[in-house]
Image: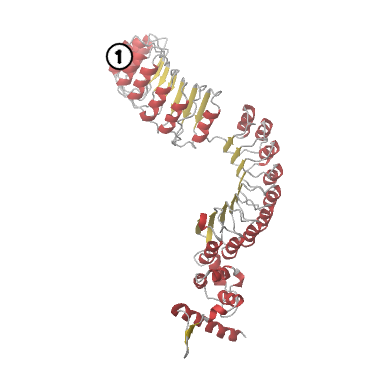
Amino acid sequence: MHSCFQATYLEVSTSFLIGSRFSAPIVFSEERFEQKKPSIEILPDECLFEIFRRLPGGNERSSCACVSKHWLTLVSNIFRDEINDNKNGVVSEVEDQEVEGDGYLSRSLEGKKATDVRLAALAVGTASRGGLGKLFIRGSNSTHEVTSCGLRAISLGCPSVRVLSLWNLSSVGDEGLCEIAYGCHQLEKLDLCHCPTSTDKSLLALAKGCHVLKDLTIEGCANIGNEGLQAVAHSCPNLKSISIKNCPLVGDQGIESMLSSASCTLTKVKLQALNITDVSLTVIGHYGNAVTELSLTSLPNVSEKGFWVMGNGHGLLKLKSFTVTSCRGLTDLGLEAVAKGCPNLKQITQFGLFGSLLNCGAKLKALSLVSCLGIKDLNLGLLTVSPCQSLRSLSIRNCPGFGDSSLVALGKLCAQLQNLELSGLHGITDAGFLPLVESCEAGLVKVNLSGCVNLDDKVACVMADLHGWTLEMLNLDGCNISNASLVAIAENCRLLNDLDVSKCAITDSRIAALARSNQINLQFLSVSGCSKVTNKSLPSLEKLGETLLGLNLHHCKAISSSAVDLLVEQLWRCDILY
């Protein structure tokens, strides 16, 4: 019987090839002539299906699928284990490997292109080209939306899919996702957003069929709730990241199951617009041993108690990133508890910095950032925001990503600054710093710019001119300043008592000008590492020494030790470091 079928197959295939190349055969008679369809078209679907599954390779099946939608439907509904070697009638191992592929191809269907026909074509076409690895579908609520038929084709033809993103697909329900769960066992990342007809049944199937799932995002799915999340928590031990937003049926039970599961390895948790309470925060604080990133947004039912218990749960020891937005239950007490309970919470981003200034503008008085590697110099366009009137002290030290754009934004927000420390910020220049200085209405009192190597004389001169009437302490250690700065300081800064110009290009003549000024009465002066200051400055330093309590001459190699000894003798009230 097998040989008989082979003969039939060869005859039909030959007829198909001739018909497709030369159109249909024409039959002539004495009275008329007529055109007949190729013989393969009259075969029932069962026969066509048997032919297609016995084709020698994926390229041949893909070519047949291009003939018509009818043939595409038939080819796309062939199971992998139904693909037979046409010589011996058994499953071909080589062909099976070809269909599986490595899954390195990525495809995206959006709007009107997101249809079942295109999904079927993808399923057939990518099978022999390495396999589909990532699939993104963005619907448009058109009349030809993706349905379970399209996802069935992907399930049958693309078992290598690892990333699947479904957005705005109202016609995709449980049936389609169950098909994915049945065929795509390598699925690692699933985004299910605004798919209102999907229910817990979908997640139950996915939990059963996709045990390697690592990343799950559910957004705007009104019919998915606790039961589905519990199934995923129980059956997906590799889950690393969850993001759940605007799902009204999700409550404390679902979040508790995700975090308290015995196999929980979650590192990223994002919860937004959910009906959860302090119970969920308590569970996170107790069981979130692996969590490094936590984001809580628009949670109206959580209170100060929840944040306090979460911080004192001793479970968030690995937490590095913590984002809270529109949660009225967060208070100083709760934030303090989180800060104490999360020792690795050290990274802050630029959005976090300016978010703090905007949200705490009426109460925040002092802000200090040290070694915050997450800050990047982004232009946030803060044009219409209200300034932070309460902030008086700002300290930013060793934040390499902090630059001019950030300083300009700070100038718009922090008009009442009095104490300013910007240390070790190589990314800031005059262009960013001057707008900040010009916006400080209250008058700067203490300014530390040590290690800001790209700031020059213009900065010091403008500060002396605008804030000389309030400035008491000025540290320009390592800045690119010279004699012009000392002239401006000597002429304008009457209240200055602490001046550090270490490692700057100042000379003996400017030290003399500083000593001749009757405007300032310095108590502390540092010229450490100023190589151009020599023994000629000895009389000027003696004059300044009338009010000095401390003088730093460390690494001033042009000043001799004998000159220093003489200074020590003359300035017996002043501590001299050499």
Q: Between residues 512 and 488, which one lies in front from this camera angle? A: 488
Q: Between residues 10 and 58, which one lies in front from this camera angle? A: 10
Which of the 4 image quarters holds residue 202?
bottom right
| Quarter containing the N terminus | bottom right
Q: Callout 1, which amino acid?
A: Ala
Q: Is residue 492 above or below residue 277?
A: above
| Residue 437 on image: x %, y % | 40, 23
Q: Residue at x 56, y 61 (%)?
A: 116
CA neighbours of label 1 inside 10 A, class few (<14), some (14 to 19), many (20+): some
Q: Between residues 176 and 270, which one lies in front from this camera angle? A: 176
| Residue 132 on image: x %, y % | 53, 61
Evaluate whether residue 26 shows in this view: yes
- In the picture of the structure, the residue carrying the numbered disc 1 is 513
Secondary structure category for the residue under label 1: helix
Q: Is residue 336 above or below residue 561?
A: below
Evaluate whether residue 575 shows in this view: no
Total numbered circles: 1
| Residue 231 on image: x %, y % | 69, 52
Which of the 4 image quarters holds residue 563?
top left
Left or right of 218 in this view: 497:
left
Left or right of 81 in this view: 430:
left
| Quarter containing the C terminus | top left
